[in-house]
Image (spheres, helix red, strand yellow):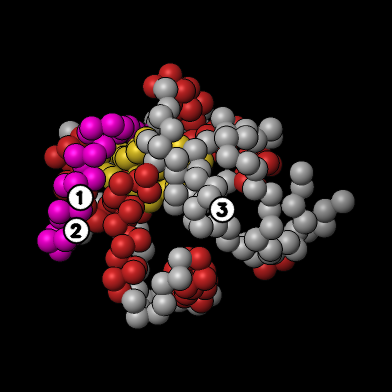
Amino acid sequence: MAVPADDRSDESPVPPAGRAASSVTEALCTRRSVRAFLPTPLARELVEDLLATASRSPSNSNTQPWRVHVVAGEPKRRLAEDLWESLDAGQRAAQPGYPYQPGPDEWAEPYRTRRAAFGDQLYRRTLGVQPGDGEGRDRHHRRNYEFFGAPVGMILTTSAHPLAGALVDAGLFLQALMLTAREYGLDTCPQASFIDFHPVLRRHLDISDDEIVICGLALGYADREHPLGDLATPRESVARFATFHGDLT
């Protein structure tokens, strides 16, 4: 199921909820950052299988610096309530564990334009939240901290020692985990929002000072009836991001 190099549309195939991807290409093309999940529970054995497969990801000198904290049921509910309380009290961490992104007014082009287009797609066109509607945006943002209703939430961390390389390794592990989930008919959403409240995560999940919180990950079956169940974003063409040096046959 090859995707044409110049395809920038949102029309990559979306399988019915629960349908497994049959190839790596299909897993990549049907992966979405899903922001609405069904409450269908997941078996621990299934989650362990996903993690075991993702652990085959490469890492610098096979250091495997990633750690995963899995939450479900009552612990997930308590964590969400504490995160909401900290959010409402304005208790974001003064510094995240690593510099994930620049400030809102510090983005260079073309990234500023791409972010603005995504924000318009998510809030105005999909959720009906108009520009200037701070309350509407806040309502959606709060859903991050309950993992968008997914039955399983994960917090991905990595060692603070080989940090720069470990961030790359953690990204490889995260991608493998999301693609493996598609093979099982599951969906995911990686969530950077959790790094703003890493002290709360440390209290609940016994995350050591040696661990840097990388992101959260919602895991479950997508709610295809929800407007956010199938939100798809465009991709730039190969011609716009790749430079070829030398001739290829």
Residue 230: image tag? 3
The part of the chain drawn in magenta is: 65-94
| Mark 1 vs mark 3, CA separation in Å | 26 Å
> Hey, what amino acid is under mark 1?
Leu
The residue at 69%/49% (across/down) is: 13
The residue at 40%/37% (across/down) is: 39
Q: Which residue is mark 2?
A: 87
Quick one: 66 or 236, which is closer to the camera? 236
Quick one: 198 or 121, which is closer to the camera? 121
Q: Position of residue 207 (x, y in %)?
A: 20, 36
Which mark is first along the chain, 3 or 1? Answer: 1
Question: Taking 139 as reference, is 42 above or below it?
Answer: above
Q: Is residue 90 magenta?
A: yes
Q: Residues within 10 Å of mark 3 (few under 14, many from 20)?
A: many
Horizontal side of residue 170 vs 176, given as left or right? left
The outermost residue toward the right is 249
> Hey, what amino acid is under mark 3?
Asp
Helix, strand, or loop for circle 2? helix
- Front disc: 3 or 2: 3
Horizontal side of residue 154 vs 196, given as left or right? right
Which mark is first along the chain, 2 or 3? Answer: 2
Horizontal side of residue 56 vs 30, given as left or right? left
Q: Which residue is mark 1?
A: 83
The residue at 62%/33% (across/down) is: 20
Q: Is residue 56 visible?
A: yes
Helix, strand, or loop for circle 1? helix
Q: Residues within 10 Å of mark 1 (few under 14, many from 20)?
A: many
> Hey, what amino acid is under mark 2?
Leu
